[in-house]
Image (cartoon, helix red, strand yellow):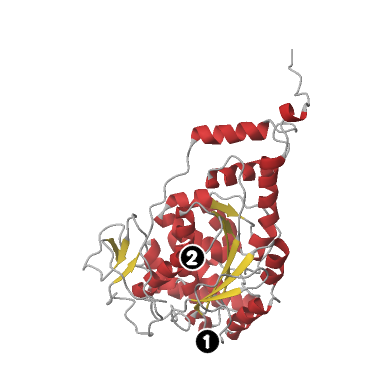
Amino acid sequence: MVLPELRGAPYLRLCNPPATPAPGQGRFAMSTPTPHSAEPTEHSHDGANAATTAIAAIPAIASLADAAFTQRVQHAIDHKTKPLGALGRLEQLALRIACILGQDRPVLQQPQMLVFAADHGLAARGVSAYPVDVTWQMVENFMAGGAAVSVLARQHGLALNVVDCGVARDFPAREQDPDDKLPQPGQPRLWRRKLGYGTRDCSQGPAMTVTECAMALRNGAALVRQLPGNALLLGEMGIGNTSSASLLLARLCGEPLAEVTGAGTGLDAAGLARKIGVLQEVLQLHAQATEPLDALAAMGGFEVATMVGAVLQAAAERRVIVVDGFITTAAVLVASRLQPAVLERCVFSHRSGEPGHVRMLAHLGAEPLLDWQLRLGEGSGAALAWPLLVSACAMLGEMASFAQAGVSTRSEEA
């Protein structure tokens, strides 16, 4: 399957490295794109030297800064029938959504929950308390409607899209498999975007080739283009993916691994110490992978890379991006290092119980809506926060002003 290009935007080429990479480029350089296949590839081990040329399209994302528009919306909020600032952060949220959508009275339409799933070769090193089979089993649980995100998506009217980016198992054919079929109300949709049966063990070499990384980015962007609506909620599933998030945080933000690595799915003290030791090996092995996409290819996951592409495309389309926990925030971190204005489109749903998430949010300047010590993933935190976004829009669009309601304003002080 050949994916369409992003029209009228700059592109980033993932290509054979020069003998000495130019500053700020690593193994990636700017160039003009040519189409390439996005079908799953064999697990050849050419990721380190980028033997195959591949293309990833990165859209240019402009800042949303518009002082006049912001002032107009803020004036409307300030003159609702309430004391100034009395609705606290709900007012800030309403302003943010209005600025993202460019609407004085924003309306959230056809929200799409995307749960990106893949396996990680690093899981063989014992970095998770659960076996890798849990990834495919949970995908089946999503499709059967029994997972937390399934329940919350149904409750809040979110279309549930599960994306097989690289699960180490094939799933049976389903009625909605053709790409022209969108999710039906209350029915999850499985999108098959498998790049392989899990990444390679990144303690032995790169997790993926640059070609695979490029394909993942393109797959994520193409899927978002296919989905309706103006809001995207991020979720993920992949045994071992908290390790990728910790590694990306350590490399891109310079945080000490031992301080940003948590128990994940429930490791005991000995297991956590082993996990930290393994991740230190990985970080040292890929010491030269310092640029965002180099680090992503070397130490990321197929689901994280696909999510990066989805985030970039959603930002380019000015969709509201609702970020879940540690792993989804890692994808946003990578995307924001490629296009910083991505962050202007994001609403961070919660601060998770993973120690690295607190520091990652701080690096992004993000203040999440909830702090409930969630650490499930799946998009569960994004789904829980969703009603707050709906309420923010309702407040801005439906709440009367003092003038409309005939209510007196605060008396002027003498």
Quadrant of residue 218 in the image? Answer: bottom left
Q: Please name the amino acid that badge 1 sits on.
A: Asp
In x, y percent, where is residue 388? Answer: 69, 51
Tag shown at residue 226:
2
Quadrant holding the C terminus: top right
Quadrant of residue 384 in the image? Answer: bottom right
Taking 303 as reference, is 376 left or right? right
In x, y percent, where is residue 386? Answer: 67, 56
Tag shown at residue 303:
none
The secondary element bearing badge 2 is classed as: helix
Q: Given this view, does label 1 or label 2 mark the residue nearer the observer?
A: 2
- Report which residue position mark 1 lands on: 170
Compared to residue 82, the image places residue 287 above or below, namely below
Q: Which residue is drawn at 39% across and 76% down?
A: 1
- Of residues 170 and 287, the one nearer the viewer is 170
Q: Please name the amino acid that badge 2 sits on.
A: Gln
- Of residues 79 and 323, the one nearer the viewer is 79
The secondary element bearing badge 1 is classed as: loop
Q: Mark 1–mark 2 contact, CB under 8 Å?
A: no
